[in-house]
Image (cartoon, coloured by chain):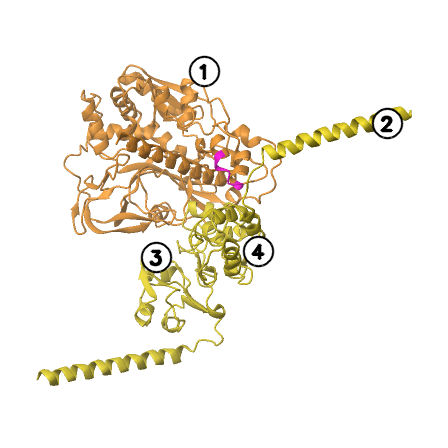
């Protein structure tokens, strides 16, 4: 009896030692050399594996960052500048600060603004709906309201507002990963600069139809009248294909465009004070009068000099 | 020979051919017609008229915009008012030529007599040219340019021309009516195509639920005496009118994945297309008319119609002319209930392939709420292409394009049998159609890349 126990223990011990030696040898022989910095970089990444950076996940991003010679082509939208600075310090690079961005829904076709012209009864997916027809309203550019963007968001930052039928972005949760931008078949959602204290100005419409058609389909449509572009002092607004676009890198948040927009398609958000349209309009009118006077004076001067 | 049918899948929707006893009536022209420049599969046509031009019926309005494209002719005489985008029945903007109708003056080259011309021209090239110049496209639904189909690539030989008279979609009766009323023209058209294809045999496939059409077509064949044309009675089963299903039913041959009918020696043409070929070749009459059924669930018999319409007539005008939209109509469909498209815009105009204005009631069209898949396999049983819709649906949701291609999502013919048979009311077709589009995109991109690489290698 005692002998059996001794033999068993002995055999198992020897077997264990032999297998340990084999494992040790295999681990030595087939060892994969990996830059330890990959692990370090991965540790500071958000770990969401959302793919917003364009890589398969955080580790793939870290791997690429370690191999890269510069970080200019890589950006983690979720971690933002904070994470990028950490990554840069680990790898000894320097990165320029990027303005934080967030997803902006550029459609204001609420149930009130944009009456339904027919009823959609198919699969509840924007992609399917967009492939079938121009949608259940007169606007063939606006939000389809089936919530593909909500389904695409991994951060719970998007939700459908049951009252308006439009998606709403939670500014706190949005990481600007861009998943919703890709999911929207109508290309309504855009990544825009968050702006100082969240203040930003944008055209909440992508309707390319001519003014009367757009207006008929939706009360809040951009009709491409160009008033905003004419008013803008900073050259931030362009009108192409009957729809205005505000370049957020040029916009100075003066809100003049918002005041002159006849349909209310231009939205300003997070401003501390409500927009006093009349005051802004008066300011614009005064400026124009002054400019006209100056031009007149100039012309008179020229006349005097010539004549 | 007994009754034949295809070997796999299919469903039996109710017949509902309410308008089958209504003779074809001529639909008058409205004051204005809008002719779409995208009435066929392939590239849209390019307008060749200018605003202010006076046009005659049958005059060319648009030229083919590519190899797979077709001529478009004026359905009315009058003045071109505008050439501008207008919304089609799905609400998407398409280039339209607007014509203010004045009188009914035909292009002098068109033979307007009603006599049957049975002598078939000898020159094949001339026949093909006529078919192309008259803008004939397949009228079974896909509107594929007929001259392309009748001109097989070198090395491929057509063994059998199949004239599709199955009209397997419920409600539709336009092919049935034309087979009853113009059987001889159809047979001459078939004989013309037979000649172009090098004298192959020709089978007219008609489903058993149309005994009158079978008898009339048989009588017409016997009277005209062209060699090698027979009628084949088919069992009633949807989607028998699908090209690949019809080949399977008639020839017992199956077109392989990604293949074309000509690979198994078949060319399929719709019965109404054969009629249009007759008019094009024998009368030099371009394709500007087609037959359209106005029908629906709760429509009384006297309000069901079969119209001979000119292309470019707004659907709203047809609905008005036929007595207005019935109060019970919850959905208006252009085409059959299985594959047709719901109309979101009644101001859209008829095109060459328009086949119906179908009013469906709330009860027959409302979708039921989707529930979970119970793995019953009914969809796989119903699929006439031998696909597994439940699997494709799952793969689409996980966006696995590789697996979708492996499981042949690209072979889906969008017949809707899976959706029709699903007891859980899962929108299988909606998802698989998306998946098909995505896989086709991948296949096309790969083909383009391979072509570019081959060209680079040549250099």
Q: Image quarter for residue A19?
A: top right
Is B147 on the left-hand or right-hand side of B246? left
**For mark 2, does the 10 Å Cα neighbourhood hold few (<14), some (14 to 19), or many (20 or more) residues?**
few
Q: Which residue is mark 2?
A: A6
Mark 2 or 4, closer to the camera = 2
**For mark 3, does the 10 Å Cα neighbourhood hold few (<14), some (14 to 19), or many (20 or more) residues?**
many
Give the letter of the orange chain: B
Please state the extent of the stretch shown in magenta in the rendering.
Answer: B397-402
Mark 3 or 4, closer to the camera = 4
Q: Which residue is mark 1?
A: B2
Secondary structure beneath label 2: helix
Quadrant where the image shows the C terminus of chain B:
top left
Question: Mark number for residue B457?
Answer: none
Q: Chain of mark 2?
A: A
* Residue A274 screen position, x and y as percent: 47, 76
Q: Spatial distance from mark 3 to mark 2, Cα to Cα? A: 87 Å
* Residue B75 screen position, x and y as percent: 24, 42
Secondary structure beneath label 1: loop
Q: Chain of mark 4?
A: A
Is A94 on the left-hand or right-hand side of A227? right
Q: Chain of mark 3?
A: A
């Amino acid at each position: 009896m005692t002998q059996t126990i001794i033999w068993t223990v002995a055999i198992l011990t020897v077997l264990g030692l032999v297998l340990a030696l084999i494992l040790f040898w295999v681990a030595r022989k087939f060892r994969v050399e990996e830059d330890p910095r990959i692990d370090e970089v991965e540790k500071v990444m958000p770990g969401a594996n959302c793919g917003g950076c364009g890589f398969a996940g955080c580790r793939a991003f870290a791997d690429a960052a370690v191999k890269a010679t510069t970080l200019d082509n890589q950006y983690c939208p979720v971690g933002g500048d904070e994470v990028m600075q950490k990554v840069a310090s680990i790898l000894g690079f320097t990165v320029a600060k990027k303005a934080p961005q967030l997803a902006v829904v550029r459609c204001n076709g609420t149930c009130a603004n944009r009456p339904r012209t027919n009823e959609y009864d198919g699969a509840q997916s924007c992609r399917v709906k967009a492939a079938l027809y121009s949608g259940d309203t007169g606007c063939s550019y606006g939000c389809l309201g089936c919530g593909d963007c909500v389904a695409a968001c991994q951060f719970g930052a998007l939700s459908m507002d049951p009252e308006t039928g439009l998606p709403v972005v939670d500014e706190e949760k949005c990481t600007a990963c861009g998943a919703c931008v890709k999911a929207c078949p109508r290309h309504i959602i855009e990544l825009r600069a968050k702006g100082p204290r969240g203040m930003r100005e944008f055209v909440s419409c992508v309707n390319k139809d001519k003014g009367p058609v757009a207006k008929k389909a939706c009360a809040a449509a951009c009709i491409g009248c160009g008033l905003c572009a004419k008013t803008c002092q900073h050259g931030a607004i362009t009108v192409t294909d009957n729809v205005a676009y505000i370049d957020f890198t040029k916009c100075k948040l003066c809100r003049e465009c918002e005041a002159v927009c006849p349909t209310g398609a231009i939205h300003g958000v997070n401003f501390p004070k409500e927009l006093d349209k009349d005051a802004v309009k008066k300011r614009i009118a005064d400026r124009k009068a002054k400019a006209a006077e100056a031009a007149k004076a100039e012309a008179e001067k020229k006349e005097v000099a010539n004549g | 020979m007994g009754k034949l049918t295809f070997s796999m899948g299919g469903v039996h929707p109710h017949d509902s051919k309410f308008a089958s006893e209504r003779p074809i009536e001529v639909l008058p022209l409205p004051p204005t017609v809008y002719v779409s420049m995208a009435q066929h599969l392939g590239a849209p046509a390019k307008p060749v008229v200018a605003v202010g031009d006076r046009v005659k019926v049958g005059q060319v309005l648009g030229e083919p915009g590519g190899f797979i494209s077709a001529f478009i002719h004026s359905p009315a005489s009058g003045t071109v008012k505008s050439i501008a985008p207008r919304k089609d029945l799905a609400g998407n903007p398409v280039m339209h030529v607007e014509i203010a109708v004045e009188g009914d003056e035909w292009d002098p080259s068109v033979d307007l007599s009603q006599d049957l011309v049975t002598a078939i021209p000898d020159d094949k090239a001339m026949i093909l040219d006529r078919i192309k110049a008259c803008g004939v496209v397949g009228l079974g639904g896909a509107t594929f340019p007929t001259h392309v189909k009748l001109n097989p690539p070198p090395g491929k030989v057509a063994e059998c021309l199949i004239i599709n008279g199955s009209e397997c979609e419920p409600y539709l009766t336009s092919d049935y009516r034309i087979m009853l009323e113009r059987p001889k023209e159809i047979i001459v058209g078939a004989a013309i195509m037979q000649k172009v294809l090098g004298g192959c045999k020709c089978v007219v496939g008609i489903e058993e639920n149309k005994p009158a059409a079978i008898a009339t077509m048989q009588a017409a064949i016997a009277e005209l005496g062209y060699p090698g044309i027979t009628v084949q009675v088919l069992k009633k089963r949807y989607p028998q009118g699908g090209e690949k299903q019809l080949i399977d039913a008639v020839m017992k041959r199956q077109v392989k994945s990604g293949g074309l009918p000509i690979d198994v020696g078949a060319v399929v043409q719709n019965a109404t297309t054969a009629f249009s070929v007759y008019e094009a070749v024998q009368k030099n009459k371009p394709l500007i008319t087609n037959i359209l059924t106005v029908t629906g669930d709760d429509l009384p018999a006297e309000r069901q119609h079969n119209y001979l319409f000119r292309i470019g007539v707004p659907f709203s005008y047809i609905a008005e002319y036929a007595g207005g939209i019935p109060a019970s109509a919850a959905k208006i469909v252009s085409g059959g209930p299985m594959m047709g498209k719901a109309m979101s815009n009644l101001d859209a105009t008829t095109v060459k392939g328009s086949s119906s204005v179908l009013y469906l009631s709330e009860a027959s069209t409302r979708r039921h709420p989707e529930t979970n898949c119970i793995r019953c396999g009914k969809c796989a049983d119903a699929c006439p292409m031998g696909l597994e819709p439940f699997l494709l649906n799952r793969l689409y949701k996980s966006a696995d394009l590789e697996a979708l291609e492996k499981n042949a999502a690209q072979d889906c013919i969008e017949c809707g049998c899976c959706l029709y048979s699903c007891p859980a009311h899962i929108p299988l077709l909606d998802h698989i159609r998306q998946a098909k589009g995505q896989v086709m995109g991948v296949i096309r991109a790969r083909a383009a890349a391979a072509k570019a690489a081959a060209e680079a290698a040549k250099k």
